Image (cartoon, rainbow, N blue to C red):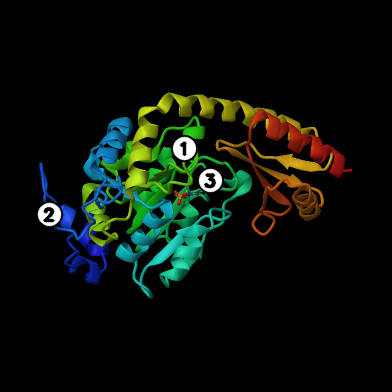
Amino acid sequence: MFNIDNITRKNIRELTPYSSAREEFSGQATILLDANENPYDTELNRYPDPFQQELKNAIAQLKNINSNQLFIGNGSDEAIDLLFRAFCEPNNSKAFIFPPTYGMYEVSAQINDIEIVRLPLGPDFQLPDLETIKDEIKSTGLLFICSPNNPTGTVYGLEQIKAIADCFYGLVVVDEAYIDFSDSESALSLLDSTPNLVVLQTMSKAYGLAGLRLGIAAASKEIIQVLNKIKPPYNVNTLSQTKGLEAIKNRSTVQEQIKKIKDQREALSTGLQSIKGVKKVYPSQANFILAEFENAVSVFKELQNKGIIIRNRTSLIKDGLRITVGTPQQNETLIDTLKNITP
Ligand SMILES: *Cc1c(COP(=O)(O)O)cnc(C)c1O
């Protein structure tokens, strides 16, 4: 049986967390002389809510989960780092990844001195068959499934994710940074039946708020309690909390943009397929498209010279370039430019 105490590092289990001034009081205060703030109103002279309760309530309602199942970080990257620090121990736990995938898992594992085990994706970037990895993943640590996967745009079925989680002794982290662009169901629906699951989402992509740095981790309340215990007390600033809440309340704008981006994903895919130097365009459930080019690196550089920046992924995927879906105008310019620089 999965028990959170068994996988929490001893030093974290035994930690008495820093208790911030704002944590220890709740209710109506009229005079705040507890936190050495400047008493004159600048709109930001007060420390932020350490647990972002209002923002969490809004997200919880939207996602149909309990707010005590939510952690909000300074970007998803903060959540990833805290998961390593709480639930991995050097020389003991491992970080399992399915490359080609998002680079931060590996970087964060290295920073935390955790061994990385790479289990490459199969044909069409599908997850390897459970039978072939079952024995290898009998370990503690973190196992990352990025769905839709960056940089391939592939989504993975919930049954497959659940089956992997049931074989793993550590935490399975499903990174859903691009879920709002996909037609698939979120792994949030597995939370109740999967105690070792963490689902990451972010306001950096579909919500158009990459500059705010708001990452979301959803998990059991026991896992969230551990993350709360070790996070920097004021990890999400006041402006981010306010703007994040505003964006959730005005969600219709975001929904319209998502629809446009999904339509443009099709247009861009069609455009790319019409270009002679493009060998393959992969289907995508995200807001980017992976394509294989002849002379990929020189195409990448020529675009760069013309002021168009795309992502060179040739180190991960042979001849692979990743293109973010832009506005209709941007996509058209890209396609026209490609027509001129490819044979
Ligand atoms: C962009 C991205 C994120 C978002 O990270 P933030 O720190 O929340 O901006 C997370 N995971 C993947 C796979 C991404 O591509």
SS assignment at label 3: loop
Q: Residue at x 45, y 64 (%)?
A: 108
- The kind of residue tagged 1 is Ile
Pointer 2: what residue? 24
What separation in Å lies between label 3 and label 1 (alpha carbons)? 10 Å
Number of dots carrying numbers: 3
Q: Residues within 10 Å of mark 2 (few under 14, many from 20)?
A: few
Q: Quick one: label 3 or label 1, which is nearer the N terminus?
A: 3
Q: Position of residue 140 (x, y in %)?
A: 34, 63
Pointer 3: what residue? 149
Q: Nearer the viewer, residue 291 or 323?
A: 323
Q: Residue at x 80, y 39 (%)?
A: 337
Disc nearest the viewer among 2 and 1: 2
What separation in Å lies between label 3 and label 2 (alpha carbons)? 41 Å
Residue 55, image quadrant: top left
Does residue 117 sit above or below 331 in this rendering? below
Q: Residues within 10 Å of mark 3 (few under 14, many from 20)?
A: many
Q: Position of residue 178 (x, y in %)?
A: 49, 40
Pointer 1: what residue? 179
Q: Quadrant of the C terminus?
A: top right
Residue at disc 3, CB closer than 8 Å to ligand 1: yes
SS assignment at label 1: helix
SS assignment at label 2: loop
Q: Nearer the viewer, residue 297 or 138?
A: 297
Residue at disc 1, CB closer than 8 Å to ligand 1: no
Q: Is residue 181 left or right of residue 339?
A: left
